């Protein structure tokens, strides 16, 4: 199998730091589980939904999605940016930009014009909600050709990367080195990002999507910040200098924020009585509270994983290396597996929460198996 690195994380670092790629596998699996959870109970939009009505399932599903949303996509942007400066330095502006258009632009075209219409067709034709028609008949009335779906991340990463390339035309950042921030600075920065996110959500509430790009601008304050931090971390060698003690502190803080802080949202809402939407729409104190909590959770989890992983998980693994090689293909194609499974089982007459327990692990395994096959296809493996 070719050793071409994934487009999400373009280049391997010079140091023997393999745990970053182990983390990439975990994050990719979390993306699949995130969408499976939305399918069967958590708030959010997806191609196919079969929501449970059991409060005992909805609450943990909502918590899982909320914690995921707080860190996992921002972490992807950080990890992607971490290796961009070295790639630019090695290739130069022309080759670097051409490579990014190949590895990021082609998947966007494929998803929008090939995969997205087929995913929509599966949901339309096989859930019993419409009379069955052929795929060509469906395409005859299909009008959502520019739809990046889950590849909104790839579209944003391409834009961020191009912005960095333009920045490098005017500023040579190779001599810029900032030390890894302290715990206090990380927490302070997270609070600031939370406050800015609150302000952004006054105009772009959580859930509002910029069509056809698929950008939820209410989350983009963190994404932009994480991408910039990844660039800074690369120059400052933060990963090499990651401190285990900092990681433990961040882990404890994150656990308290999740297991003590998150239930408080439910308790306060029950005691005060206000629409749950107030947590997502700027202009309410609840939205400020949630935005700050969300960023504190996100930054503490990311810092904990980076710092603890450097000590505990930085060991070579042939299995995880193989899975890491497939992660971009898995990210692109996992909706096909998840939607295929959930639609195939939609007539199975059991509680959706129980169906989730069956579909979620199958979707993870099936997506990685499909990814393993895709990265073996000549030509395709140059892109994914």
Image (tube, helix red, strand yellow):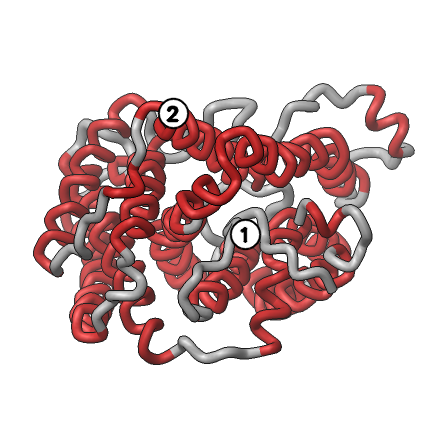
Instruction: Please say if 6 is above or below 113.
Output: below
State the separation of the CA atoms marked 2 and 1. 39 Å
Asked which quadrant contains residue 371, the reply is: bottom right
Mark 1 lies on residue: 35
The residue sitting at 57% across, 34% down in the picture is 95
Asked which quadrant contains residue 110, the reply is: top right
The reply to whether residue 86 is visible in this rendering is yes
Instruction: Please say if 63 is above or below 126.
Output: below
User: Which residue appears farthest toward the left when viewing the image?
Assistant: 184
Q: What element carries label 1?
A: helix
- Residue 132 coordinates in the image, percent (x, y): 87, 36
The residue sitting at 78% across, 59% down in the picture is 376
The N terminus lies in quadrant: bottom right
Instruction: Please say if 305 is above or below 216.
Output: below
- Residue 120 coordinates in the image, percent (x, y): 72, 36
Check disc 1: other Cα within 10 Å, few if <14, some if 14-19, many if 20+: many
Left or right of 7 on screen, residue 382: right
Instruction: Please say if 341 is above or below 287.
Output: below
- Residue 264 coordinates in the image, percent (x, y): 19, 57
Left or right of 151 on screen, residue 345: right
**Mark 2 or mark 1, which has the lower sequence index?**
1
- Residue 90 coordinates in the image, percent (x, y): 49, 44
Mark 2 lies on residue: 169
Check disc 2: other Cα within 10 Å, few if <14, some if 14-19, many if 20+: few
């Amino acid at each position: 199998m070719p050793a071409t690195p994934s487009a999400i994380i373009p280049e391997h670092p010079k140091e023997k730091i393999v745990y970053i790629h182990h983390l990439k596998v975990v994050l990719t699996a979390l993306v699949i589980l995130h969408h499976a959870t939305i399918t069967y109970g958590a708030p959010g939009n997806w191609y196919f939904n079969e929501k449970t009505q059991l409060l005992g399932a909805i609450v943990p599903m909502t918590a899982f999605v909320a914690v995921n949303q707080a860190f996992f996509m921002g972490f992807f942007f950080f990890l992607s940016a971490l290796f961009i400066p070295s790639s630019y330095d090695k290739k130069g502006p022309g080759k670097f930009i051409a490579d990014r258009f190949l590895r990021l632009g082609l998947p966007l075209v494929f998803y929008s014009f090939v995969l997205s219409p087929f995913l929509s067709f599966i949901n339309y034709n096989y859930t019993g909600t419409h009379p069955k028609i052929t795929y060509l008949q469906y395409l005859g009335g299909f009008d959502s050709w520019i739809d990046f779906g889950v590849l909104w991340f790839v579209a944003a990463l391409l834009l961020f990367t191009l912005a960095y390339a333009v920045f490098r035309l005017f500023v040579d950042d190779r001599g810029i080195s900032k030390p890894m921030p302290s715990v206090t600075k990380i927490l302070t920065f997270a609070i600031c990002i939370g406050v800015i996110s609150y302000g952004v959500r006054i105009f772009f509430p959580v859930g509002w999507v910029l069509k056809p790009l698929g950008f939820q601008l209410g989350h983009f304050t963190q994404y932009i910040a994480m991408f910039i931090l990844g660039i800074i971390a690369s120059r400052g060698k933060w990963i090499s200098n990651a401190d285990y003690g900092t990681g433990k502190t961040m882990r404890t803080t994150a656990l308290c924020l999740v297991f003590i802080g998150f239930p408080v949202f439910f308790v306060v809402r029950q005691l005060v009585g206000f629409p749950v939407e107030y947590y997502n729409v700027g202009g309410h104190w609840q939205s400020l509270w949630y935005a700050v909590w969300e960023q504190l959770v996100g930054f503490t989890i990311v810092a904990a994983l980076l710092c603890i992983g450097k000590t505990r998980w930085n060991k070579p693994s042939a299995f995880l290396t193989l899975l890491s090689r497939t992660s971009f293909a898995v990210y692109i194609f996992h909706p096909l597996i998840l939607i295929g499974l959930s639609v195939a089982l939609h007539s199975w007459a059991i509680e959706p929460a129980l169906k989730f327990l069956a579909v979620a692990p199958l979707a993870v395994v099936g997506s990685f198996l499909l990814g393993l096959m895709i990265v073996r296809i000549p030509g395709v493996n140059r892109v994914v």
